[in-house]
Amino acid sequence: MATFHFDLVSPEKIAFSGEVEQVDIPGVEGDLGVMAGHAPLVASVRPGVLTITVGGKHEKIIVLGGIAEISAKGLTVLADTATSLAELDRELLAQQIAEMEEALKEEEGSALDRAITRLDHFKAIHQQVISTAMH
């Protein structure tokens, strides 16, 4: 399978840099699978699980928003936060979800809608973390 260069960068670190076969990105307008030769594109990244495929193996990394740019040079994702499932503090994630649920009580109108959407993404990430841990 053809490969391409992929960089995953967050403010804290370079979370990944290397040749990959595929990257699945949680996009704001829908999930996006990127393989070698993909057309140039810039997309917003929503909170979710980004999957990197190298040598037929999958590495899952939680991203909490950002920007993805596909060019002739490869794919770069500038993530607000990037944490591998192995590094994830599951208890902290559960606590963040509880805090977000509590904060919803103070929101109104479109701010409430945005907060609920973000909470739904965090709950989906938490569920995926739990199901991944069981396998």
Image (tube, rainbow, N blue to C red):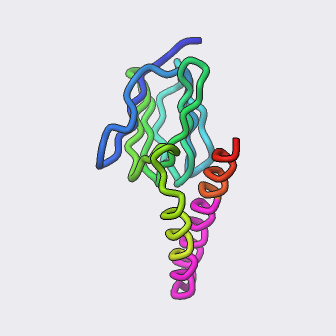
- Which residue is found at the position 61% from the left and 57% from the top? 126
Q: Nearer the viewer, residue 64 or 99?
A: 99
Q: Which residues are magenta?
A: 101-123
Identify the residue at horizontal 30%, vertical 42% (top origin).
13
Q: Residue at x 61, y 20 (%)?
A: 56
- Placement of the N terminus among the 4 image quadrants: top right
x and y percentages locating residue 39 in the rendered image: 52, 26
Residue 33 position within the rendered picture, expressed as x and y whole percent measured from the top left? 60, 33
At horizontal 47% and vertical 29% (from top left) the residue drawn is 40
From the viewer's perspective, is 29 left or right of 134?
Answer: left
In terms of depth relative to the viewer, which is nearer, 65 or 43? Answer: 65
Name the image quarter holding the C terminus: top right
Callout count: 0
- Would residue 22 be counted in the magenta stretch? no
Of all residues, the one furthest to the left in this rendering is: 12
Q: Main secondary structure of the magenta part?
A: helix
Is 119 located above or below residue 105 in the figure? above
**Vertical relation: 106 (above or below) 81:** below
Vertical placement of residue 128 versus 20, above or below: below
Instruction: Report whether 65 appears left or right of 105.
Output: left
Can you give x and y, in whole percent of width and height, for residue 59 in the image? Answer: 54, 33
Q: Is residue 131 above or below residue 103?
A: above
Q: Is residue 110 magenta?
A: yes
Say which of 121 and 128 sits in front.
Answer: 128
- Tell me residue 82's x, y (percent): 42, 47
